[in-house]
Amino acid sequence: MPPLLLPASPSLSLHVAGAAASSSRRAMVAVASAASRSSSSSSFDASAFEAERLRLDAEARASMATTALGAQAEADPRAWKWKIRKRVWDVLEAEGVARNPRPVHHRIPNFDGAAAAADSLGRLDVFQNAQCVKVNPDSPQKQVRFLTLSGDKKLLTPQPRLRTGFFSALESQMIPTGCIPEACTSVGAAKYGRPIGLDEVIKVDLIVIGSVAVDPSTGARLGKGEGFAELEYGMLRYMGAIDDSTMVVTTGIYWEKLSPEKLGQIRILRELKRRIEQETGTILPCGPSENLPPTAQRRRRRGR
């Protein structure tokens, strides 16, 4: 089902994408054996885990950058996805709303307002009523993972790129007092979580997914281009953990909340709005005027 969109602050978006990359397919081969490994906190080597995660992360992002440049150079029909991703990544950096880890390129980007978007999610009935929430492991969704565990819900989170494991299941009673913030990180999830395999009997009530770009009218979304969100979704369907009725949530744009002043400050949003209106033949709504704080006012660059 199309994802439910939550407004971010500012009203930029995060989102996950189309085709599964070849690295995604390779990762699935490794899942069966990796999922059976134990991650008891007593014997867990956090520094080794983090070093390997960072190595694989750098390797994968370098590979994605090469693939993106090659696709564009050869006029590959798939290159349009990379152009959209690059525009979003570029504007997050240029507008000063990107947050660590930097650069945000070739990542599910962290952004100013990620915590506020998570808090908006936390007020939804679908989140409050959920007993088990699947959340991606990226930085902008850390607050969602914290709200899940601190709300005594079961957290299901995939190991990064499915390379060092499959899914980790965490519950607050499994985590030492005061360690929930650590458990919300990739290292903490592997340290305190219980690895699960494809035969696990589990019911996921809500999926929270990070993105790079999203179409607010349809819920179609793009991620960083590796296809892991789709791979994870497919495996959960195979396991019977989710079905057509399972709600999928991501952060996006509510045009009716976007003031003319805010729209005037963010060129990429103006372009997106123009294209949607041109393609659909309808005029998108606009929010009421507002006085932007000085930090949100950006001088126009020469030539624009």
Image (tube, rainbow, N blue to C red):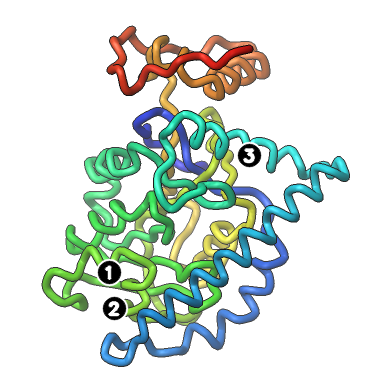
Please say whether residue 67 is visible from this viewpoint.
Answer: yes
Residue drawn 49% across the image and 53% down it: 244
Q: Is residue 283 left or right of residue 178?
A: right
Residue 256 visible within the image: no
Identity, as a three-letter code, of the amino acid under mark 3 = Lys
How far is disc 3 from disc 1 in space, using C-alphas? 31 Å
Q: Which residue is mark 3?
A: 86
User: Is 277 left, or right, of 142 in this rendering?
Assistant: right
Question: To which residue does mark 1 refer?
Answer: 183
Residue drawn 38% across the image and 36% down it: 6
Give residue 303's quadrant in the image.
top right
Give yes or no for contact between labels 2 and 1 (Cβ–Cβ under 8 Å).
Answer: yes
Mark 2, residue position: 192
- Residue appearing at x 64%, y 66% in the figure: 24
Q: Residue furthest left?
A: 177
Give neighbour class at mark 3: few <14, some 14-19, many 20+ (Cα, 10 Å).
Answer: some
**Residue 49 sits above or below residue 88 on the image:** below
Circles 3 and 1: CB distance less than 8 Å? no
* Nearer-N-terminus badge (3/2): 3
Dividing the image into 4 quarters, which one contains the C terminus?
top right
Amino acid marked by disc 2: Tyr
> Helix, strand or loop at disc 1?
helix
Secondary structure under tag 3 reads helix
In which quadrant of the rendered view does residue 89 lie? top right
Task: Please name which of the two marks, 3 or 1, marks the residue nearer to the observer.
Answer: 3
- Residue 137 x %, y %: 42, 61
Which is more toward the observer, 8 or 172?
A: 8
User: In terms of sequence position, does the residue under pointer 2 or pointer 1 come before the other?
Assistant: 1
In front: 68, or 214? Answer: 68
Say what amino acid the circle numbered 1 marks.
Answer: Ala
Q: Position of residue 116 (x, y in %)?
A: 28, 38
> Marks 3/2: CA distance?
35 Å
